[in-house]
Amino acid sequence: MRPAGRLTARPAGPRPRETTRAARTRRKWYEIIGLTTPAVVVFSMFVLAPMAFAMYYSLYKWNGYGWPTQFKGLENYFGPFGAFKDPIFRDALRNNAIIVVGSLLIQGPLALGIALLLNRKFRGRAVFRMLVFVPYVLAEVTVGIMWQLILLRGSVADSILSSLGLGHFITGWLANLNVVIWTMLFILTWKYTGFALILFLAGLANVPEELTEAAAIDGASWWQIQRHITIPLIGSTIRIWMFLSIIGALQVFDVIWVASTPAVRSLGASNTMATYMVDHGFNERQWGYGNAVAVILFVISLLAALVFQRFVLRRDIEGAQTGRAR
Amino acid sequence: MTMKRRLGAVLALVTTTTLALSACSSGSSGNPPQSKSDLYTHPVTLTWWHNANTDGPLKTYWQKVADDFHALHPTVTIQITAVETNDLQRNKIPAALLSGNPPDVFQAWGGGEMVEQVQSNYLKDITADTKDIVTNIGPAASIWAVDGKQYGLPFDFGIEGFWYNKDLFTQAGISGPPATLDDLNADIAKLKQANITPISVGAGDKWPAGHWWYNFALRECSAQALSDAGTKQNFDDPCFVKAGQDLQTFLATKPFQQDFLATPGQTGANSSAGLVANGKAAMELMGAWDGGVMGSLTKDQKEPGFLSWFPFPSVSGGAGNQTADMGGGDGFACSKNAPAECVEFLKYIDSPDVQKGFAGTGAGIPVVKGAELGLADPVLQTIAKATQSAGGIQLWLDTQFGATAGTAMNDAIVAIFAGKGDPQGVVTALKQATAR
């Protein structure tokens, strides 16, 4: 705060007496208020107020007509018909967990491997980079519909599998209730690996070549260089990607909404907290209940973000690249 | 601190006053009711929300209706907004009603949803001005009435039945449409023997699966049991469990296409309607709009010539009316504070010529007597006749029960389709639905 005030303090002007300490403090506060007010107003109106409203509505039974009047306390959360007692909502939590863990375990290593390969110099490198990134650029709805058509019984995916001699694996990719969530994870991986990749490539571009050259001169193999020099140096990038991936996976909606049918969702086979919220809040017109689910989703995301920041991202935020070893 | 508290108190006072004031204004009747002589004296703009959002005969026709009304009454200008039906029903209309600035004329499906809208005092009571038309329409109009007062008018109403492929039936050696459930089961066996998928169902969208249970309930339940369910939320009659058992028995014969949980009802060539339209399944249980949907899903964008129709067969031993049918329709309502011209416009939509023109679009079955002569499609003519001669018409149960109970019921029915639920589950879901 202080340096800002000092920097913007006017040099002694026509009224030299006013530049006392008190006046400076006052001016500093005017500046802070003046400069932050627009942002604070917008943030309050579009972030804080809706959150407060959601929490308020979540305490009511409300069908969206008129203002909520039937106060129910925390029943939408913990009551006998509350979210935590609904097996379908618990399915949604499980599905979200599968997507969070699956994204971290599959997308991360996959993208890292591709990034390390693409980080070498070879002809057509730009084309490869672009190709891997294309799925991320496609709109979610397009991706959902595209995979729906590919995975239809007897369609492209099935014929590829049969021609590979894997015909006996064929199942209703989007209809077999035990398989659908893994199909969804596959589509999400296909789509979002490109995002991890582009981040990792950007991180790799910042690794000084001198280090790898020196290691190579010392006789380190390519793999040793990657393992002990390159990967540790892009650690902060990897951790940021993990953070974004976790939050994205908790809130995933569009691909699942489009690629799996309402029936499959309502049976708990592919639903996530976000699709469950819309299915109940809007389509079943349980607005109070839908808001309760929104609040749960918000709290879980917030907790995940805070824990991750506290234990994983802290050293990056504090600026140390290597920091204490764990 | 005191300063802050005083500010808070002032804010609270201002807020409550505003709320109280707005409550008063929405609580009273708003604009004083215009007398008849006031009609068409002042320029009025009517906003009209309907669901014919895709380019097609109905969208074009509604624009023509608006233009014609304006030509007839130059003081009235009509502004149309067309929104996809699910979005319109679930999001746009509730949000607009809640905001206090709703459209003047908007789509209304009757049943439980309309009851909720009336309870919140959102709709204009049009009873006095529509007596003649309501008499002309007959019993169907009562679906747009709550407690004996009329709040909307249908423009389309028809019963549900099987849309089937005559050619495939012949190919399988079936001579005529089945009259009983046993006949239907025999036909299914014949179709399977001929390697034809007997029935397609868009269970992915839930409600098309739900309709199977509704029809079994209609056959199993007495009129009294159905009426108690609709008006008193009483589902204690064992017939509702029986309906689920019938469905389970029927499902055990595997009459439907593979992967039906992933099949949508009416989007794309692989939807249940698309399968019938493209000759990949022999029949589908669906409302009167299905021909139009199928027409949009074929290569040449035309309704297939092989289509024909029969009503839901009778179920032996059922306590229900075996000649009654499930049905439903579309209508429009006026919001509470809409100008009196709004009601005139609703009546205009249901005037004989406009209804005849609607019939000509092939988008549905008109409600006003005589207008069915405008139907060009032979299948729709069949359904129109069957609608008039039906032994009784029961509104789609999900529409009647409203969105909350209706969706919970459909979820439980889909669970039976998936092999994860049981007949009792539907009744339990219905009883518990209103808890949230």
Image (cartoon, coloured by chain):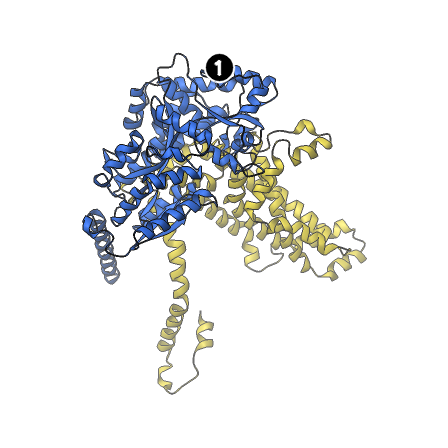
Chain colours: A yellow, B blue
Q: Amino acid at mark 1?
A: Asp
Picture layout, residue A221 above or below residue B368: below
Residue B233 visible? yes
B362 vs B149, nearest the viewer: B362
The residue singled out by tag 1 in the image is B183
> What subunit carries mark 1?
B
Q: Position of residue A291 (x, y in %)?
A: 38, 43
Residue B63 falls left or right of residue A306: left
Which residue is situated farthest in the top direction here?
B317
Q: How many dots with numbers?
A: 1
Picture layout, residue A11 above or below residue B165: below
Picture layout, residue B86 above or below residue B341: above
Q: Residue at x 68, y 56 (%)?
A: A204
Residue A261 falls left or right of residue A67: right
Residue A61: quarter of image: top left
Q: Secondary structure at mark 1?
A: helix
Q: What is the quadrant of the N terminus of chain A in the image?
A: bottom left
B27 vs B180, nearest the viewer: B180
B19 vs B176, nearest the viewer: B176
A204 vs B177, nearest the viewer: B177
Categorize mark 1 by other alpha carbons within 10 Å: few (<14), some (14-19), many (20+).
some
Q: Position of residue A276 (x, y in %)?
A: 45, 38
Q: Residue at x 60, y 38 (%)?
A: A149
Residue A81 visible? no
Picture layout, residue B31 above or below residue B118: below
